[in-house]
Amino acid sequence: MPLTLEEIRSAPKVLLHDHLDGGLRPRTVIELAAECGHELPATEAGALGDWFSAAADSGSLERYLETFAHTVGVMQTERAIHRVAKECALDLADDGVVYAEVRMAPELLIEQGLTLEQAVEAMLAGFGEGSAEAAREGRPIKMGLLLVAMRHAARSMEIAELAVRYRDEGVVGFDIAGAEAGFPPTRHLDAFEYLQRENAHFTIHAGEAFGLPSIWQALQWCGADRLGHGVRIIDDITPTADGGAHLGRLAHYVRDKRVPLEMCPSSNVQTGAADSIAEHPIGLLSKLGFRVTVNTDNRLMSGTSMSKEFALLSEAFGYGWTDLRWFTVNAMKSAFVHFDARLEIINDVIKPAYAKLIG
Ligand SMILES: O=c1[nH]cnc2c1ncn2[C@H]1C[C@H](O)[C@@H](CO)O1
Ligand SMILES: [Zn+2]
């Protein structure tokens, strides 16, 4: 029997890959759009939620990304950004997430005159207020912010410097996102080299809409700590006649080095990176012992949550509590907060809760 959504909601979960502009509540998009005069494709919350899932369900990353015009478009004031960030923390906590790294590109939030710093500070303040409220309601969550640079643009160095400047204020790392094909991570090598010199952490969206060369560059040229998605590592793995698998050099490297894979099953099905949840490479990669983590990517566009992703996987692969604990501990081990903070959550929160569930 697969675990139910309600059961999974009660278990502590860790989320490493979630976009702030991909997780707004439909009602919030509508209210903010009315305030700023942004025109939406639907004006009733249910219909708008459906519009996002349908429009994002295109089989193409480029078309999927077009839907963000309607979230980024309403996030151009400090008040709006603060509200979105606060609701994000509240919604994740309500779903049973105990540690989250949420990412956003500040360069997308300055269309109406905000500075990059004002955008970052509004996100951090929103996370602070949301997590304080969640703690008062008995659902503590620790929130970290990852600053994203858009891979087609040319601001990555500036955003990397911003990530370092705010590292003690709640920014825990850096990422690049946006269309992958034609925009290799090495375009931003100076930013990654700068971050390495600063002892800072970063992940790179790689191996989602483009294959092995993107993963190879992200790791071996840029020095990524983790891979955003990384699903296409499957291209370097060949099933063998005896039911085993032959790994190429890059796949071996990723597994040997315990490179965390931030897998986002529903999002991958929508962008065409996987044909279905049941056929998603996460099943084989987990079986082969890669450091797999489960993530939401964009809760609004995929109509999902951490619990829902786990429920879908439980249904497709028969995963039970031991598997969910493995994914959760993998994610917490791979977080960008300091080692002692990771251990504390693993030992004081995750392990005792799953011990009870496993029985
Ligand atoms: O799955 C994704 N791949 C590449 N880029 C993405 C994905 N999801 C969201 N983004 C982009 C669109 C957002 O506006 C941006 C910052 O969150 O990141
Ligand atoms: Zn993403």
Image (spheres, rainbow, N blue to C red):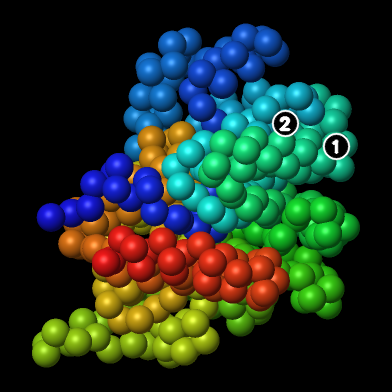
Q: Alpha-carbon neighbours of circle 2 within 10 Å: few (<14), some, or many (≥20)?
A: many
Q: Residue 195, image x and y in percent?
A: 79, 70
Q: Nearer the viewer, residue 14 or 49?
A: 14
Q: Is residue 216 above or below residue 45?
A: below
Looking at the image, residue 162 sits to the left or right of residue 124; the answer is right
Residue 73 appears anywhere in the view: yes
Q: Upstream in the sequence, badge 1 or badge 2?
A: 2
| Label 1 SS | helix
Specify the amino acid type for callout 1: Gln
Q: Quadrant of residue 277?
A: bottom left
In this rendering, the answer to whether 113 lies above or below 252 is above
Residue matched to label 1: 118
Q: Residue at x 24, y 47 (%)?
A: 4
Locate the N terminus by quadrant.
Answer: bottom left
Picture coordinates of residue 261, whole percent (x, y): 47, 69
Is 244 left or right of 158, judged from the image as shown?
left
Q: Label 2 amino acid?
A: His
Residue 31 x %, y %: 59, 14
CA separation in Å, label 1 and label 2: 10 Å
Mark 1 surroundings within 10 Å by alpha-carbon count, few (fewer than 14), some (14 through 19), many (20 or more): some
Disc 2 marks which residue? 82
Foreground residue, 217 or 109? 109
Give the percent coordinates (x, y) of residue 158.
84, 54
Towards the viewer: 305 or 275: 305
